[in-house]
Image (spheres, helix red, strand yellow):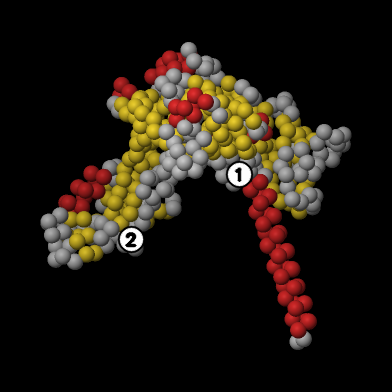
């Protein structure tokens, strides 16, 4: 084979590899850039724009949803190039589907369209104390145990791992850490059977406690059965359902989302604010008042989009007291992703002790589904809030974002290198948790 032929083969191989890589990248980029679901308000024309690198068409599978791009499209040919602005309209409530095709030929993606009446919620911004039970005993990690003869052993190595949940011990439900301590002590070195949940699969394992030089018995596992903290109530619906935080509660040691069996919201009092600085986010410090007289609601779900549940009558009274004389306790319309735009907006917070709407700027809007709780980049511009906190601090997660009189999102994260900036989540992602 001549040198010229080798070079030609090399260039041909590079071309095909580059082509395949480009196609794969385009496929994944487009799949992430285009939402799996769109929300419409009945009898309102909604505008969308998804800049895409290739030509695609969008076709309605139902006459109930009309697709258009501002031109005179025949009713039997309701398709268009999606890399240009387009609109959707429906006069009927329900769930419908749009079909996305590459180059107008290749089926690429089905988009669900949910059409409903205008939804309303009360933007709160009030701090709440959080107490949440894990759904089983969460395994934080494993470690070595020093035996009575001075040697070390890791009895849980290869058996349990971080993120496992112990659901039962010797056939009895494992409700808290004391159940494990008691079972290990009573076993006195005899094998213990554990029902363990891992990645939604349940398995039974047997472990033998190790006797230490002090005469105690240990399994060499670190476990947690609950978590507490302070967060911000984002919204409450007229039916008493709430959403808070805008992101899930994760274990502080493993970083894994905590699977919960339920929990409660309680009164909290902000005692101090540590302002954020370059490379060091600020934080709220406060006291949570536990007990039946301080209970504000129940926690029913902990998801990537926040915590959710139902408020009690006491929380309604707090809302009336805090918001009634401030920004207002009346529900406002929900704004969907197509309603959100770069520019001025507000976040509602009671961080000063009173509810206030503070000015921010929405600097970036990511309409894709790649990061469900990092769809917005916001910057605090309100001089009073900057003076009070330095921007966004830990504990403000869940502060509702309001733009053009609509509840459109919530604060979720602060930028470590710039505490005046942070991320936000679309409110529709929280409502669809």
Residue 115 visible in the shown view: no
Q: Which label is found at residue 310? A: none
From the viewer's perspective, is residue 267 above or below residue 23?
Answer: above
Residue plotted at (45% across, 15% down): 320
Which residue position holds label 2?
Answer: 159
Residue plotted at (34% across, 39% down): 227
Q: Foreground: 112 or 385?
A: 385
Residue plotted at (45% across, 43% down): 279
Residue 105 horizontal/vertical position (percent): 79, 52
Residue 125 horizontal/vertical position (percent): 48, 25
From the viewer's perspective, is residue 369 above or below residue 427?
Answer: below
Task: Report crowding for label 2: few under 14, some 14 to 19, many 20 or more residues within 10 A (C-alpha).
Answer: few
Residue 123 horizontal/vertical position (percent): 52, 24
Q: Which label is found at residue 369? A: 1
Task: Report crowding for label 1: few under 14, some 14 to 19, many 20 or more residues within 10 A (C-alpha).
Answer: some
Whichever of labels 1 and 2 marks the residue nearer the N terminus, that label is 2
Where is the N terminus found, in terms of image quarters? bottom right
Q: Secondary structure at mark 1?
A: loop
Q: Secondary structure at mark 2?
A: loop
Residue plotted at (74% across, 81% down): 6
Residue 129 horizontal/vertical position (percent): 37, 30
């Amino acid at each position: 084979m001549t040198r010229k032929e080798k070079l030609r083969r090399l260039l041909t191989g590079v071309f095909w590899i580059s082509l395949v890589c480009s196609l794969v990248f385009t496929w994944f980029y487009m799949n992430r850039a285009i939402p799996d679901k769109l929300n419409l308000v009945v009898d309102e024309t909604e505008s969308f724009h998804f800049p895409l690198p290739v030509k695609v068409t969008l076709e309605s599978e139902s006459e109930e949803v009309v697709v258009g791009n501002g031109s005179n499209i025949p009713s039997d040919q309701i398709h268009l190039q999606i890399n240009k602005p387009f609109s959707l309209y429906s006069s009927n409530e329900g769930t419908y589907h749009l079909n996305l095709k590459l180059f107008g030929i290749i089926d690429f993606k089905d988009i669900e369209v949910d059409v409903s009446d205008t939804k309303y919620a009360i933007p709160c911004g009030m701090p709440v104390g959080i107490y949440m039970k894990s759904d089983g005993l969460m395994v934080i990690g494993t470690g070595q145990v020093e035996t009575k003869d001075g040697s070390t052993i890791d009895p849980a190595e290869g058996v349990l791992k971080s993120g496992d949940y112990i659901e039962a011990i010797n056939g009895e439900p494992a409700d808290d850490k004391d159940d494990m301590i008691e079972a290990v002590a009573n076993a006195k070195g005899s094998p213990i059977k554990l029902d363990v949940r891992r990645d939604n699969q349940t398995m039974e394992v047997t472990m033998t406690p190790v006797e230490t030089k002090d005469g105690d018995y240990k399994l060499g596992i670190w476990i947690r059965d609950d978590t507490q903290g302070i967060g911000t109530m984002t919204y409450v619906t007229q039916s008493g359902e709430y959403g808070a935080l805008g992101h899930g509660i994760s274990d502080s040691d493993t970083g894994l989302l905590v699977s919960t069996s339920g929990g409660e919201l309680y009164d909290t009092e902000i005692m101090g604010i540590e302002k954020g600085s370059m490379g060091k986010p600020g934080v709220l410090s406060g006291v949570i008042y536990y007990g039946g007289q301080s209970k504000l609601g129940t926690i029913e779900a902990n998801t990537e989009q926040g915590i959710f549940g139902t408020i009690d009558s006491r929380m309604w009274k707090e809302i009336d007291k805090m918001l009634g004389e401030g920004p207002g306790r009346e529900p406002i319309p929900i704004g969907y992703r197509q309603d959100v735009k770069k520019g001025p907006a507000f976040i509602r917070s009671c961080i000063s002790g009173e509810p206030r709407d503070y000015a921010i700027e929405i600097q970036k809007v990511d309409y894709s589904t790649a990061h469900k709780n990092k769809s917005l980049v916001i910057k605090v511009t309100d001089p009073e809030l900057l003076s009070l906190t330095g921007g966004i601090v830990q504990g403000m997660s869940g502060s509702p974002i309001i733009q053009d009189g609509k509840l459109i999102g919530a604060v979720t994260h602060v930028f470590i290198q710039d505490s005046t900036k942070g991320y936000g989540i679309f409110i529709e992602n929280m409502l669809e948790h």
